[in-house]
Image (cartoon, rainbow, N blue to C red):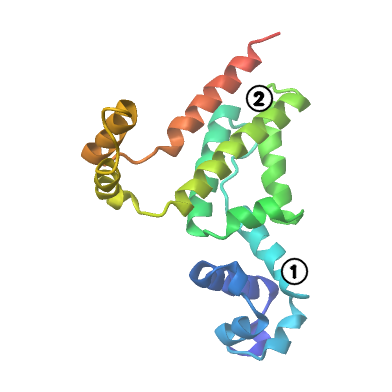
């Protein structure tokens, strides 16, 4: 790729692709330069260092999340935002931990937060209520996503894993554990992000009816 064609977003998008493939910890200027077909030193015209790259790729991921515009009902907006964020974090398995562990207020993050808090405030939440709603929704978002990303087996493996576990349990002593494991083994159950999300949204909606 000709050097003149490089710009900051192109460099950061290449970094996202590398992080998706090998993890964010593996990102180096040398690897990024190789991926772009340039010398590593030329990247410093567009990014300051690895920290700048990490902040930049987090901000681009946040910028890709669907945040509904003003005028969207708060519940519809939060549902769309949460599902879009969950899908984005699954596409980029490294992103959730970076978002939670780095202080970065770039344009993507600012847009994401402003739209989130804006739809809540427009929907009738107080400042405190909007903060509580945001934190509660994101606790479900990040907790569910990280658990899903870090399960030691895939959803298609759940029945066999359940059968293996059940074989090592004293069923008479732990009947309810055995019952649940047997259900997973037979049904191939996969946990549902939207179930918890809807329960939270319904609960938040009830807080608006309280004086």
Q: Does 50 appear above or below 106?
A: below
Q: Which residue is mark 1?
A: 52
Q: Does 163 appear above or below 38?
A: above
Q: Position of residue 35 (x, y in %)?
A: 56, 83
- Report how far apart the C-alphas of labels 1 and 2 lie in the structure: 36 Å
The secondary structure type at the circle numbered 2 is loop
Going by the image, does 102 lie left or right of 18? right
Q: Earlier in the sequence, mark 1 or mark 2?
A: 1
Q: Residue at x 72, y 31 (%)?
A: 131
Neighbour tally class for label 2: few under 14, some 14-19, many 20 plus, Cα within 10 Å: some
Going by the image, does 47 lie left or right of 194? right
Going by the image, does 140 lie left or right of 39? left
Residue 73 visible, this angle: no
Q: Residue at x 48, y 58 (%)?
A: 91
Q: Position of residue 193 (x, y in %)?
A: 45, 38
Q: Which residue is mark 2?
A: 123
Q: Quick check: marks 1 and 2 in contact, CB under 8 Å?
A: no
Name the residue nearer the viewer: 57 or 51. 51
Nearer the observer, disc 1 or disc 2? Answer: 1
Name the residue nearer the viewer: 175 or 120. 175
Name the residue nearer the viewer: 133 or 13. 133
Residue 19 visible, this angle: yes
The secondary structure type at the circle numbered 1 is helix
Q: Quadrant of the C terminus?
A: top right
Q: Residue at x 29, y 27 (%)?
A: 175
Name the residue nearer the viewer: 175 or 203. 175
Q: Position of residue 145 (x, y in %)?
A: 51, 47
Neighbour tally class for label 1: few under 14, some 14-19, many 20 plus, Cα within 10 Å: few
Q: Quadrant of the N terminus?
A: bottom right
Q: Residue at x 70, y 23 (%)?
A: 125
Q: Position of residue 174 (x, y in %)?
A: 33, 29
């Amino acid at each position: 790729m000709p050097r003149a064609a490089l710009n900051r977003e192109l460099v950061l998008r290449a970094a996202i692709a590398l992080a998706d493939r090998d993890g964010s910890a593996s990102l180096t200027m040398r690897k990024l330069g190789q991926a772009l077909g340039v010398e590593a030193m030329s990247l410093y015209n567009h990014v300051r260092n690895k920290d700048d790259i990490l902040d930049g790729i987090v901000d681009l991921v946040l910028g890709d999340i669907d945040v509904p515009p003003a005028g969207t009902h708060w519940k519809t907006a939060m549902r769309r935002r949460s599902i879009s964020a969950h899908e984005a974090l699954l596409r980029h398995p490294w992103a959730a931990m970076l978002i939670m562990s780095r202080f970065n207020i770039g344009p993507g993050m600012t847009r994401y937060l402003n739209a989130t808090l804006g739809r809540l405030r427009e929907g009738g939440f107080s400042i405190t209520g909007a903060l509580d709603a945001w934190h509660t929704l994101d606790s479900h978002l990040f907790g569910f996503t990280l658990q899903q990303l870090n399960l030691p087996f895939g959803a298609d493996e759940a029945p066999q894993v359940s059968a293996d576990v059940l074989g090592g349990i004293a069923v008479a002593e732990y009947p309810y554990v055995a019952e649940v494991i047997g259900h997973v083994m037979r049904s191939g159950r996969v946990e549902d992000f939207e179930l918890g999300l809807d329960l939270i949204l319904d609960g938040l909606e009830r807080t608006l009816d309280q004086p």
